[in-house]
Image (spheres, coloured by chain):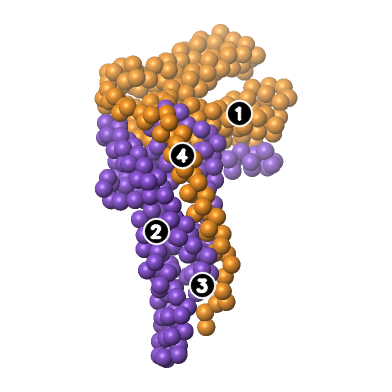
Amino acid sequence: MTWTVISFVVLVGLLLAILSWSLRESAEDSPARMKLVPGTGSPLHNALYYPQVRQTFSEEDLNYLQERGSPKLARRARAERQRVALEYVKAIHHDFRSLLQIARVLATLSPKVVAGQEAERFRLAVEFELRYRCVRLMLLAGISPQWQLLKIVQTVGTLSTRLDAAILEMGERAVQALQETAGTA
Amino acid sequence: MSQIGILAVLAVLLRSGNGRNYPFFTAYQASNLVQATILLLAYRKFGYVTIAAFAVYWTTQGVVLVLRGLAVAELCRGVLGRFTGIWALAARVLLACASAIILYAVAVSDWHGDKAVTEASRGLELAIAGVVVSLFLFSRYYQVPFSRQNRALAAGFCLYSCAVVLHNTFGDFVSLRLFNFYNIGMMLVFCLSLAIWGRALRIPIPAQAQLPPLLEDDSYQQLSPAINARLRILNDRLISAWKVEAPLP
């Protein structure tokens, strides 16, 4: 059995595995079932809750609990804080995916796309997905991320709302157009 | 047995009117039938294991392979062609993918003597399978509608091409005495592909609806970099999460 034979067998196995994975049509991948429904608000709507989440993470609040309450209460608060962080990171992930979905639909319905833009977006998506999984694992393991993590939200939240509206409007138009196409395919 | 299957697929194509939608696929099926007839006559005239029969087989096989390639190109265009922007991108990506696979096959194959032809065939079949899988990935990534008929065509092509690659790869290890039995497996996969194609194509494909007007060119030019910038910011910020506090007590 030579290296060539092994490499061809592995390649064929890989191709068949991807084929069978691709043939399984998942609900979320169907354009007709896209979650971005017109009127649901900005794809970055989770960013709007930044002040509330920031308050949840306030060190002052935790110190106050430790001083005035019991260590048990402080521990409970800390655990609750972890849960909120997990939920929040999940929500940011959802925002990222929504934005990505709009970008894909925008590309699909554009008469001309730039390969560099598409390649960069693909790279960003892969990177974000990997990092998101790492952060999630860290949180699940009880490791608390620093404040910088929450700055993600601040950054997103303070971006131009006008651009938000433009992206959303274009996204809605594009999704609607693609849904019409999918309905007739 | 496979000839009956090809005839059945051709009949299905003609009856459902899908032959007009897939002219290269129909030509490919017809070429399979013509090849079988030519080979039957050649084997009778020259014998089975002769240089003349070998030459006739690989010449006709070349024509069949070219038509297979064109049928796959037709399929890719059928799935993505309506979306001009990503079709231009996909065509380049798929060509690059096919070229990379062929280069790999050329680099690792044994090009001595009569093996060169089977090695070339293996490389081309692997490229076809690679293109089909890339088409699936591309359409999934961009969430382009992929009709049942096109999915069946693509799956059949990929399945058969993978089988040919394995058949050619392990062919060297099979003795001449057992080769006819070895070929039966290949024929069964071909019949399975024919069954997949025949089943999917028996229903006439409705005329494709007019695509809604594509977005203006400047919409993409304006919004795509802006979206990428936001995604980049989100990504960069997530790096900060690597700096962690001590584990909780």
Report the amino acid beneath label 2: Ala
Query: Mark 2 — residue?
Result: A47
Q: CA distance from mark 3 to mark 2?
A: 20 Å
Q: Do the residues under discs 2 and 4 have CB atoms within 8 angstroms?
A: no
Chain bearing mark 3: A
Residue in the picture at 28% in, 46% down: A37
Separation of residues labelled 1 and 4 (CA atoms): 29 Å
Task: Give the image location of residue A166, x and y in percent.
Answer: 36, 42
Q: Earlier in the sequence, mark 1 or mark 4?
A: 1
Marks 3 and 4, how far apart at CA: 34 Å
Q: Colour of chain A?
A: purple
- Amino acid bearing label 3: Ser
The residue beneath circle 1 is B99
User: What type is the residue that disc 1 sits on?
Assistant: Ser
Is label 3 or label 4 in front? Answer: 4
Q: Name the element at disc 4.
A: helix
Q: Which residue is identified by label 3?
A: A144
- The location of residue B241, given as percent across then percent down, is 54, 64
Q: Where does the image place residue A28, in percent across and percent down from the top left?
A: 35, 48
Q: Residues within 10 Å of mark 3 (few under 14, many from 20)?
A: many
Secondary structure type for disc 1:
helix
The nearer-to-camera label among 3 and 2 is 2
Please tell me in which quadrant of the rendered image residue A154 appears: bottom left
Q: Secondary structure at mark 2?
A: helix
Pointer 4 residue: B224
